[in-house]
Structures are given as C-alpha cells and as structure tokens.
Amino acid sequence: MVNKRVLYVRLPCWKIYPGGVIYVADYIHKHRPDVEQEILDLALVAKGRRKQALVERLRELKPDVVAFSWRNMQSFGPHPEDDALDVVMNFDHSRNPLTKIKAAKDAVSIIYDYASARLNNFSYMRTVRRMLPDTRVVVGGTAVSIFGEYVAQKCPQDSVVIVGEGEDAMLSVVDGAEDLEGEYYRKDHEGRVSHHRREQMFDLSTVTAVDFDYIQSIFPDFGSYLDDYIGVQTKRGCPYQCHFCLYNKIEGARQRYRDPVEIAKEVETLNKRFGVKKIWFTDAQFCSTRRSTRHVESILDELLVRHTDIQWSGYLRLNFVTPELAHKMLATGLCSLDLSFAGSQEIIDRLTLGYSLAQQMDAFRMFKENGYTDQKIKLYMPLNAPGETRETLLQTIDKIEELYAMFGRDNVLPFIFFIGVQPGTPVEQVLIDAGYLKKDYDPLTLNPFVIKRLLYNPPPLGRIIGEAYLQAVDMLGGTEDDEYIGRLTMELLGERLRGKGKGKQTEFPVRFRAARAPSSVSVGSSG
C-alpha cells in the first residue's frame, strides 16, 4: 500500500542548502505525484523551538513516513558555527596559561554541544514514534552513510536507516515495500538490527531537472537559501583511492552521470526563475577522469547556449582540462579553482592522491593563459599528513609562492586543514597499525583527548604549524579574515622551518608505502 504523506525533517546543522533532501523529494514527486510531501528544515528553526516545530507538523500533517536527514555527527568536524580549529590550536600550542584554560573550557562547550545535538536528534525520532506509533521512521544523510549501524542501534523500533543515495530506497519506502531498494539497516519491532547491501547502483541518468516550483510549494524556507551557493549534482561516484576519503565507499567507485541537458535546465531555472547567482557543483570532484571531463564540457556547452548569468565552482581535478575547456569554464562563470593541494610529490604519493605535481602546475599556467582574470585559487592543504617532513612542508610553501607570482598574492587562498581520521579509510588502518590509535577506539567518542588524535596533527611539526598559526592570528589583531590568516600562517611557517634547518624527519613511526604514480596521472582535488 502506497504511503500518502511524507514529512522530511532536516536535522539541525549550520545553514547550508539541503540538496540531498530536495533531490529525493523531487524524485518521489515525479514517480508518485499523488503523495503529499513537506520539508521541515530544523537548521532554520531557533534551538528552543525545534521540538515544538516538529510536534506541530506531526499533528497537522499526520505523515505516514517521517524521513530524517542527518548531515554530520563526528565532533572533530569544524564548521562555520564553531571555532574548533582556534580552540585546538590554543589548547595545544599557546604559551599563555590563561589562553589554554579558556581553550579547554571552549573545547568542553563544543563537545557538549555535539553530544546534546546527537541526543536531541534521536529524541526527535522517538517523538515521532510516541506521537504516531504506526508511522515509518527513515533516517538518511551523510552522517548515516558513515555511521549507519550505530544510528540504527539508537533509532526507535521499526526504523529504516538508508546508507548512501536515497532516491530508489525512499521510493520503495513510499510504496510500502517490505524488501527495500538500495543499502540500508532495518531495526524491527523487537529491536533487532539487520543489514541489506545494495544489489545494483542507482541509475542517476533518471534524475531530471528539479521542479523548483514544486519544491517551493512543499518547502516554505526554500527562499532562505537563494542568496548563497545552491548545490547542483552532476554525477556520483569516485574512482580514486585517497587515503583519507570515503567518497568512493559512500557513492561507489564507478562514476555515474546525469544528463547534461537536465543539469543545465536545473541551473537555468535557478538563475532565471529564482534569481540564483551562485552554483556549487556538489560532486566528489566536478571533473576528474577523461570521461567526466567530457561530461563537464557538455554541461558547459549547454550553459553557454542558455546564457546563464552565474558564478560557479566545485572541487576540481585539472589533469584532463584542455585550453578550450578552461576557456569554457571561465566563460560560464567559474569564480574559483577549488582543489586539494600538496606541493610535494612525496606527500601526494604517500596519500595516494593520484596526480602529478608538475602536471598540476602546468594546468595552473594553462588557466592563466586562457582567459583567467581574478578568479580565486583556493588551496585545501592537508598539512602534517603522515610522512610529512620539514622538507616536504618547505616544498609546499615554495609552490604556493610560485602561485602567488602566477596569479597575484591576493588571489591565492591557502586553507589549512588537518586530516580527520574517518572509519574505514586506509589512513585509519595505518594509524592503528602504528599504535597511534587503539584497534578498538570509538570514532564517535566524546573523549576530547581521542578527538584530538582523530584530528591528525602530531609533533614535532604540529607544534611548529600551530605556533605559526597563532602568531598569524595575533598579528592580524583578531580580525575574521581566515583567508589572509592562511597566507600569513604559511609565510611564518616558512620562516620558522628555514630558520631551523631542512630535512629532519617527522618524529612519528608511521610508514606509508610510497604509491607509484600511474601512467595516466590525475591532478587536483583529492575528493
């Protein structure tokens, strides 16, 4: 029997466009147009009113299915609503005892917020079960794709936890099927948890342009997102095996594509019907393989025909980008080159990022020569990764300085991040084998000392990087310009490293097998 009413509940997080929920709701509407749907975004509801808002919608709609979308769960993941990086840096590396004490208090506060958010999310699910005992509870989202079994164990009875993409799974839920499509965990009436693996990947080519007029009718807060970046997905899957990334597990290693015409229609509608000016292509990487680069070019050709007036970006690889494609990217509104960056081939190979640094630098020059004006070059740098040395850090700093000379210092934005250890990744296994993590450690722990280890930045380089960062913050007098903090931090780090000599190995017993670069190497984002 088809369920007639579905309420999607976007669980609280920072304000970011809920693209996953919107794609699923649009897909269900096109396949089951008689089903009544509604989206409640708790990210936009004041903290003290969230449970009340949910109760009100449950009472009024009386949904047959309540589908929760859970974006993030681990407490070490900094985001725009907390200053976790500053807190960790000050606690570990500040020389002022009072600053350390304040950082410790702030860290406890952040962890408390994460813990209470996790408890609250499960309480929302229990509220549904208490108010509507016969309603199907479904949970999906990024957090669930990583920690599906944990979520299933904590959910109320008779719940379904969807892992990975959710369109086909949700359609079978709406249809009332007992055996669902896709990968999922099920918690039955007796509280037993079972796991069903996906038999075949979802056919992404069936996803047509989102009907945003319909979405607006079921999502009253849709307009709240239109003045910022709107996420558009062009494909799913990633064939690369970066040591710290889970995309190839969540979405599969084989890339699957949407129709470029449908993608362009979606962008055009957002731009011309709703006035959206900023598009973020949400793929693991917008262009990465030879085939995906041809797909990108088809999308850009469609956008050029439609004369869209947008700024766009997404995580990029550059190895198959031609001068003609670079010109089309710039002509359609590319506003920044966003990519993972390590200026040392040794680190690139150790992390199996799968690209040639020399080829990457050639690609930067190609962009400079084919229509580049003042687009930002955003470098996401996994500093102090396992195997990092003073020498490899200095090589990265030297390459950044080359990019300053190429594009202008103000246009190159180094963003500092440290590897967050995720369960099931190769880097996790390496760190367990090395004794850095216990074999039975809890990736969802709230122990602050374990959390700090999961945000990987060990000594001795960790202290040097941390002190350079804090010095940069102090020199800027407390301004909020994180982009400039990144530039200044790298400059100060270079001075410290050159003043202390080169080539000293990181004092940590982690050994990676240096990956041999494939004959057809890839350049750019690590996923």
Image (spheres, grey):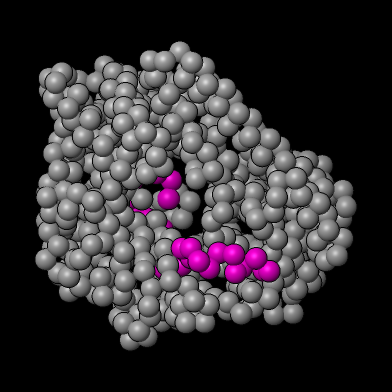
**Residue 331 drawn above or below residue 399:** below
**Residue 406 drawn above or below residue 301:** above
- Given residues 446 and 372, the one toward you in this image is 372
Residue at position x 61%, y 35% in the image: 114
In the rendered image, residue 361, in percent from the top left (x then y), is placed at 14, 52
In the rendered image, residue 65, in percent from the top left (x then y), is placed at 76, 61
In the rendered image, residue 24, in percent from the top left (x then y), is placed at 60, 66
Query: For this view, does 171 lie left or right of residue 526?
Result: right
Query: For this view, does 163 lie left or right of residue 354?
Result: right
Looking at the image, can residue 409 be seen?
yes
How many numbered callouts? 0
Query: For this view, does 283 lie left or right of residue 39?
Result: left
- Given residues 13 and 187, the one toward you in this image is 13
Looking at the magenta stretch, what is its main secondary structure? loop
Looking at the image, can residue 445 be seen?
no
Residue at position x 88%, y 52% in the image: 131
Residue 223 magenta-highlighted = yes
The quadrant in which the N terminus is found is: bottom right
Q: Residue furthest bottom?
A: 305
- Given residues 79 and 505, the one toward you in this image is 79
Residue 11 magenta-highlighted = no
Residue at position x 55%, y 64% in the image: 225
Q: Residue furthest front?
A: 477
Residue at position x 79%, y 72% in the image: 4
**Residue 498 drawn above or below residue 213:** above
In the rendered image, residue 64, in percent from the top left (x then y), is placed at 81, 64
Q: Which residues are the magenta region?
A: 219-247
